[in-house]
Image: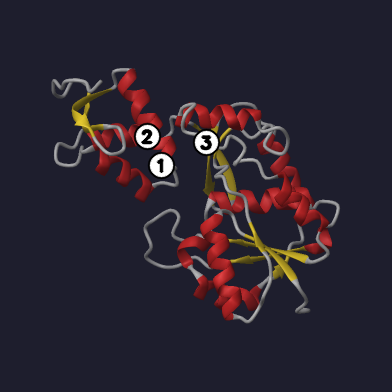
Amino acid sequence: MGDGRFLHLGSEPVSVERIGDGLRKLGRDEMVLGPKENITEGPLRDVDGTGELRRHWYEKLLGPYGMDDKSWFLSPGLWNSVVESEADVVIWRGQHPMEWLLALRACWHLRAQPHRVFEVVLPIGKGWPHPAGECVAIKGPDAVVAEWPNRRKVLDVEKRAARWEALRDHEGEWVRVLEGEEIVELPVKCFDEQIIEQCADEKRRESLFVVGKLLATTTATYALVVWRIRQLLLEGVLEAKGDLNRISLPEQLLRAGRETGSRSR
């Protein structure tokens, strides 16, 4: 395989940084780009367009005052740069839905230039329980160095582009997880049962612990978990005990009916 100049794609800012670190170790001074937002959650229908549905999604999760720059999640400049570049493109991914979605989306943007698309797939490690354990951000620059010789040409660009279109054009708000090498769509309430179960544990129901446990055992984002907890409180499924903490949740969360707790206001 030739060793010309490449443009590299990571799924989010930390991955972009790790890829850049690894490339520098390899003596390669090449551009690394990546989107700023996590598209594993929420609607996608206009993500390659105006992004208005994405705006409403973030306002629901973060509130109207949680978005200082309301266009940060749009990345038309990124994809224009990728398409217009003369360099071949390398997609970096492990076993994380965010990275698989990047691969599908990149193939859609490059569907008219399939000869330019390469990828590096990080191998699955052993004994790592975290669902994001195989992502580039966690694997780090040493994995980038080790796997660079194993880059390969993507042969199914058209198929991946079609899969991206199907996911993007599916109406509604979804959580996207990875099963094997297939993106599966789940309802936005898909983590509720895990939240409720955790809140039934009298020794581990502090809201900080509940949020941390979900982040450690699923691919859910912090914003989604906190939003779902607040919704469960509003619906009376959970009860609040104690004052608000540093993440603006009650200190403790109780499964409704198990104990009587005073709601934080």
Numbered badge on residue 22: none
Quadrant, the C terminus: top left
Q: Which one is nearer the viewer's eye here, 252 or 194? A: 252
Dot 1 corresponds to which residue?
Answer: 222
The type of colouring in the image is secondary structure
Circle 3 packing at 10 Å, graded few (<14), some (14-19), many (20+), is: few
Above or below — where is 214 with respect to 23? above
Identity of the amino acid at label 2? Answer: Val
Above or below — where is 100 with respect to 59? below
**Whole-percent x, y for residue 86 in the image:** 83, 64
Side (left or right) of 103 relative to 230 = right
Please, what secondary structure does the residue beneath circle 1 have? Answer: helix
Please, what secondary structure does the residue beneath circle 3 have? Answer: loop
N-term-proximal mark, 2 vs 3: 3
**Whole-percent x, y for residue 225 in the image:** 39, 36
Side (left or right) of 9 relative to 223 = right
Dot 2 corresponds to which residue?
Answer: 226
Dot 3 corresponds to which residue?
Answer: 68
Mark pair 3, 1: CA separation: 18 Å
**Whole-percent x, y for residue 25 in the image:** 57, 80
**Whole-percent x, y for residue 224 in the image:** 43, 36
Above or below — where is 100 with respect to 88? above
In the current view of this chain or complex, which residue is farthest to the top? 235
Q: Quadrant of residue 172?
A: top right
Circle 1 packing at 10 Å, graded few (<14), some (14-19), many (20+), is: few
Identity of the amino acid at label 1? Answer: Tyr
